[in-house]
Image (cartoon, rainbow, N blue to C red):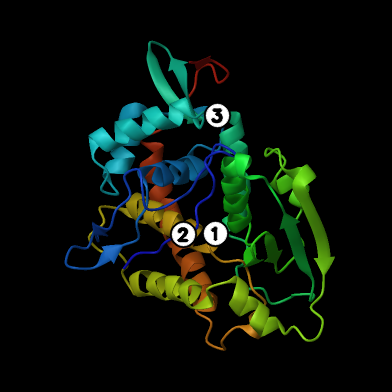
């Protein structure tokens, strides 16, 4: 089973969290057998590690420590080193000097985006308090700006927008579009409205047109197949591995969920149970993972000394 997540654009911010390329593949479950865990890029596991265990700017991880952490989720040393090199080039990680050695930490921008992304990942995907308002966005970009158009569409998908028709997108809540797209040179090409549905349009029809609800539900069902059991991933080496897998899968999963109003979803909407499972397991793995990570990271003697 594989969860396919809508990609966050690499060109808008340092934190792209796509699945499916650059080292991601269906892999045998750590438990062995024929079960398969979601396709997750090594980069995503690095981001999850940084977002939980490197939140303090005075803490960093040696390269070997990060390789150790990635090995626990099945990433080989060559892939781990290649991932670190790419993330250094992209400005997601930076080198810092610790005596005569070099250690790694997220850049200040990456750390801020990780905090924002972590907050969003654990904001409930179940929209129980919908006010009936939609954010409607129209855009038109010339063919010569195809790359910008691709980044814009990717960013809208990441923010939970669905496409009603070519150039017309909708989200089931208020979205700060200026903040969302501030790093893309497209604001002059947008028209943004707050809107309500009016006859003859019906909300269920609008949702069916803009989102693949069955695919969203299937992602949650597959998550529950793997995690809603007494001992998830029993073959994983430790709680740090289970934590990284859980955080990566859950983050990718909720980023593909626009938070549709629950009154227009099936009564047995699987996101409700999946959220309870994810929260329970996050708490279960927290202490064990923190103890393991403490043996991999180091406190910096000179927190501000970055080395390029």
Separation (CA) of disc 3 from disc 1: 23 Å
Q: Is 5 placed left or right of 180 in the picture?
A: left
Query: Secondary structure beneath disc 2?
Result: loop
Quarter-of-image position of residue 236: bottom left
Residue receiving disc 1: 255
Query: Secondary structure beneath disc 1?
Result: helix
Quarter-of-image position of residue 103: top left
Tell me which residue sits at (72%, 42%) in the image. Answer: 186
List x then y, in percent, for residue 45: 40, 46
Above or below, comparing residue 269 to residue 126 in the picture? below
List x then y, in percent, for residue 220: 45, 72
Above or below, comparing residue 205 to residue 142 in the picture? below
List x then y, in percent, for residue 242: 35, 56
Q: Which of marks 3 and 1 is in front?
A: 1
Separation (CA) of disc 2 from disc 1: 7 Å
Separation (CA) of disc 3 from disc 2: 25 Å
Q: Which comes before the other along the chain, label 2 or label 1? A: 2
Q: Is 282 placed left or right of 116 in the picture?
A: left
Instruction: Point out the residue furthest to the left here.
Output: 33
Q: Do the residues labelled 2 and 1 touch (CB within 8 Å)?
A: yes
Q: Which comes before the other along the chain, label 3 or label 2? A: 2
Query: What label does residue 5 carry, if any?
Result: 2
Q: Which comes before the other along the chain, label 3 or label 1? A: 3
Residue in the foreground of this view, choosing between 107 and 200: 200
Residue receiving disc 3: 107
């Amino acid at each position: 089973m594989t969860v396919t997540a809508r990609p966050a654009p690499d060109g808008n911010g340092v934190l792209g969290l796509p699945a499916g390329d650059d080292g991601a593949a269906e892999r045998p479950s750590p438990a062995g057998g024929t079960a398969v865990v979601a396709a997750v890029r090594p980069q995503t596991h690095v981001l999850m590690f940084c977002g939980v265990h490197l939140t303090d700017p005075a803490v960093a991880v040696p390269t070997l420590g990060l390789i150790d952490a990635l090995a626990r989720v099945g990433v080989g040393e060559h892939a781990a080193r290649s991932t670190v090199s790419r993330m250094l080039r992209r400005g997601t990680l930076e080198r810092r000097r610790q005596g005569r050695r070099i250690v790694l930490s997220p850049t200040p921008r990456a750390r801020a985006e990780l905090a924002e992304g972590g907050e969003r990942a654990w904001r409930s995907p179940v929209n129980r308090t919908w006010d009936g308002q939609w954010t409607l966005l129209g855009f038109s970009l010339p063919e010569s700006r195809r790359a910008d158009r691709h980044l814009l569409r990717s960013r809208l998908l990441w923010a939970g927008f669905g496409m009603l028709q070519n150039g017309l997108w909708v989200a089931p809540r208020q979205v700060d579009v200026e903040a969302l797209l501030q790093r893309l040179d497209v604001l002059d090409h947008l028209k943004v409205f707050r809107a309500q549905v009016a006859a003859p349009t019906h909300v269920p029809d609008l949702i069916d047109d803009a989102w693949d609800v069955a695919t969203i539900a299937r992602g949650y069902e597959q998550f529950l197949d793997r995690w809603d059991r007494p001992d998830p991933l029993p073959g994983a080496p430790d709680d740090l591995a289970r934590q990284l897998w859980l955080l990566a899968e859950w983050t990718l999963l909720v980023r593909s969920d626009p938070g549709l109003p629950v009154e227009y979803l099936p009564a047995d909407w699987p996101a409700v149970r999946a959220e309870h499972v994810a929260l329970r397991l996050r708490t279960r793995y927290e202490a064990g993972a923190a103890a393991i990570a403490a043996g991999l990271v180091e406190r910096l003697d000179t927190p501000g000394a970055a080395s390029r």
